[in-house]
Image (cartoon, rainbow, N blue to C red):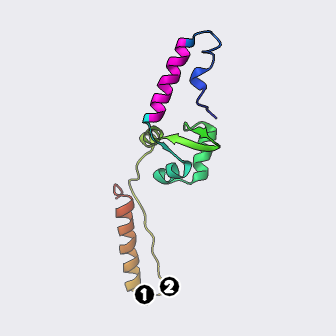
């Protein structure tokens, strides 16, 4: 777990008050200018569960800050994580019906699935 105080460890104790204050001002300036997401928002953007996001935070895979007992993730982490993720290239769809007489239903299912893939995964084949 990484806290907001990490960059300041040892600064004040070493007597370098100016350095400590400068780091504090810059950190707050950056924190105010960047948007922070909840774990639920982050999970929705990446298409994973909230539990997965919390596991990533605890393992150190993503940077997050605990604010009043709730995790806040900088928006820059979304960009960083997405740069390392491979895009979906091929998608297999599966549709079935119970009998041969339902052939029209099967064609409707296939069309609905193709539409869903087109809307949700625009880069997929």
Q: Which span is picked out in magenta?
A: 18-32
Q: Is residue 62 left or right of residue 34?
A: right
Q: Nearer the viewer, residue 60 or 21?
A: 21
Disc 2/disc 1 C-alpha distance (Å):
7 Å
Q: Main secondary structure of the magenta part?
A: helix
Question: Magenta segment: does it hold 103?
Answer: no
Where residue 111 sits: x, y (%)?
35, 74
Q: Nearer the viewer, residue 113 or 100?
A: 113
The residue under the point 50% across, 48% down is 42
Q: Is residue 65 above or below residue 27?
A: below
Residue 64, labelled with which disc?
none
Assess whether residue 22 is covered by the magenta stretch: yes
List the residue tagged with mark 2. 98
Residue nearer the viewer, 39 or 12: 12
Residue at the outermost bottom position: 101
Helix, strand or loop under label 2: loop
Residue 1 sits above or below residue 17 on the image = below
- Dots 2, 1 in contact, CB < 8 A: yes
CA neighbours of label 2 inside 10 A, class few (<14), some (14 to 19), many (20+): few
| Residue ID at (49%, 54%) | 44
């Amino acid at each position: 777990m990484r806290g907001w105080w990490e960059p300041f460890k040892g600064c004040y104790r070493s007597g370098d008050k100016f350095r400590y204050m400068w780091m504090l001002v810059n950190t707050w300036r950056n924190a105010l200018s960047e948007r922070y997401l909840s774990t639920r928002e982050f999970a929705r953007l990446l298409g994973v569960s909230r539990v997965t996001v919390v596991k990533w935070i605890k393992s150190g895979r993503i940077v997050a800050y605990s604010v009043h007992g709730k995790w806040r993730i900088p928006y820059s982490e979304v960009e960083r994580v997405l740069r390392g993720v491979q895009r979906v290239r091929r998608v297999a769809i599966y549709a079935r019906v119970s009998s041969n007489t339902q052939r029209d239903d099967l064609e409707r299912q296939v069309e609905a699935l193709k539409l869903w893939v087109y809307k949700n995964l625009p880069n997929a084949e």
